[in-house]
Image: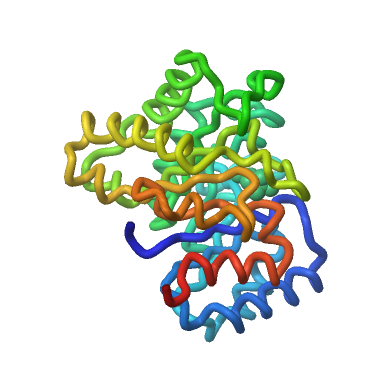
Amino acid sequence: MRKPLIVGNWKMNTTLSDAVVLTTQIRNAIEDLEADIVLCPPFVWLVPLNDLLEHAPDNLSLGAQNMWFADKGAITGEISPLMLKNLVKYVILGHSERRFHFGESNALINDKVHAALQHGITPILCISELKKIQNEKRGRGRPTFTKLRSDILQQLKMGLKGIGESDITKVIIVFEPVWAISTAPDTKGAASGVYAASVINRLKSYLEEKYGGECAADVTMLYGGSVDASNVAEFLYQPEIDGVLVGSASLKASEFIKICKIAGGPD
Ligand code: PGA
């Protein structure tokens, strides 16, 4: 596994003072870790947090939770890559909550991936297993139909449409089964490490077919869905999984710092 990547997606949470306290605590705890850490606060906190992190350790960066693809224009309520490019290193695109609440299509997400790359922002492309299986949990949520997997492949193929070999290794892919998201405070709804790795392998096979083995091996693959300090090791233990995207557990400094330490602390 390469240096682990831990992404904290704060979603629509935190006041400005929460954001400052959380970021300060994290910044003060992660300097010596062998892990890259990305905080994705709400848009409105990016400017103050960017100032706060001016002299932060190199392994701590900011990401946005979304963006529009055009540089500017009559798109009320949206944020463009031009506005973000000097504030963030990463942008989450195609999160299942965007697909579900805002009907984001694969084509739109693909436009955003291209726009992020054009502006030097690393896209974190989320590939989500469908909502409907929520009613069909088995054990730790493993779905059975192959159909679900093919939808995942469709999201991957369409999300990466037009992305060539020179750019594919700049894209980060997250596998996030929707049935495993937001099961906190009891995070037992997370997928198992083995299941997450098996799906990630399937996604990697597609990347191998399309871009060749060497390129595919260099693409960072994450798992997201109810990750916390009690289960993160199970995901990071899988050689196919390079890191995790953490939602609710990234809002508690002590929990998130624990996750980062498990990922990047001395063995
Ligand atoms: P969660 O969110 O950790 O709260 O389940 C993860 C995600 O949004 O992918």
Q: Check the image and report above or below for 81 versus 128.
A: below
Q: Is residue 165 above or below residue 26?
A: above
Task: Tell me if residue 259 can be seen.
Answer: yes
Q: Position of residue 219 (x, y in %)?
A: 32, 48
Q: Look at the image and tell me in which quarter the N terminus lies.
A: bottom left
Task: Please report the residue visible at 59 percent of the width from the left and 81 percent of the height from the top.
Answer: 29
Residue 188 position in % (x across, y down): 68, 43
- 73, 247: nearer the viewer: 247
Quadrant where the C terminus sits is bottom left
Residue at image position (70%, 51%) is 11
Q: Quadrant of residue 130?
A: top right
Is the residue 138 above or below the residue 12 in the image? Answer: above
Question: Can you see residue 78?
Answer: no
Residue at image position (47%, 62%) is: 89
Q: Nearer the viewer, residue 42 or 179?
A: 179
Q: How many labels were placed on the picture?
A: 0
The relative height of residue 176 versus residue 136 in the rendered view (above or below) is below
| Residue closest to the eye, 236 or 37 | 236
Q: Residue at (70%, 46%) from the top-left corner?
A: 187
Among the 4 quarters of the image, the one containing residue 102: top right
In the image shown, does 192 or 170 lie closer to the viewer? 192
| Image colouring | rainbow
Horizontal arrangement in the rendering, residue 48 relative to residue 56 (left or right): right
- Give percent across and percent down for residue 5: 45, 60
Q: Is residue 267 left or right of residue 39?
A: left
User: Residue 224: horizontal and vertical position, in percent?
Assistant: 56, 45
